[in-house]
Amino acid sequence: MENFILSLVILVAIAGIMMSVLLLLKNKPILRGKQISIRNFFVLLIVYMTVAMGFGCIYISLQLMGISVLTEGNYEVGGSFFHLLEDAMYFSVVTILSVGYGDITPLGIGRWVAMLEAFFGYLLPTAFVVSTVIQLKDRVKAN
């Protein structure tokens, strides 16, 4: 039963990540002159937070299922649930924003999850900038 719940958490996390990316791609930037609105900044911030939390939930769920995905130094990440939560969320945020520091490292399937997360970390600002430029170009053509 526990593995079913953890698998469900992984599926919900993946769905949340995909919905956040779709939100970013469907966002129609509000342009005021040449400046991007505060709304766009918050959309990007929410997308980053959702994706980082989604990947963090994936790391936690895999770890709770008995699949070792993160190590800190020479030791498997774990201990209390709150320590696991702290380490997994920290690793997730550091991975999506900077491709990691090396203090916590992924193992096995965790490496593949971390590579996918790092890819999203580079993809999200690109998608944001491209959608903003396209919207600006369409506005200029309309005028």
Image: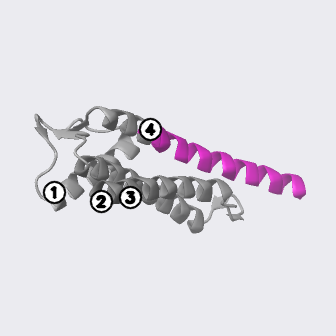
In magenta, the rendered stretch is 118-143
Name the residue tied to disc 2. Answer: 1
Mark 4 = which residue?
Answer: 116
Residue drawn at the location 38% of the way across and 58% of the way down = 9
**Which circle marks residue 83 in the picture?**
1
- Tag 1: amino acid: His
> Which of the pair 14/116 is nearer the observer?
14
Residue to which mark 3 is pinned: 9
| Relative side of 140 to 31, left or right | right
For the residues labelled 1 and 2, say whether their Cβ atoms are less than 8 Å apart. no
Q: Amino acid at mark 4?
A: Leu
User: Earlier along the polypeptide chain: callout 3 or callout 4?
Assistant: 3
Q: Residue furthest front?
A: 1
Q: Position of residue 72 (x, y in %)?
A: 15, 40
Query: What is the x, y in percent for residue 98?
Result: 36, 41
Q: Quadrant of the N terminus?
A: bottom left
Secondary structure beneath label 3 = helix
Compared across the picture, whether 136 is left or right of 3 comes to right
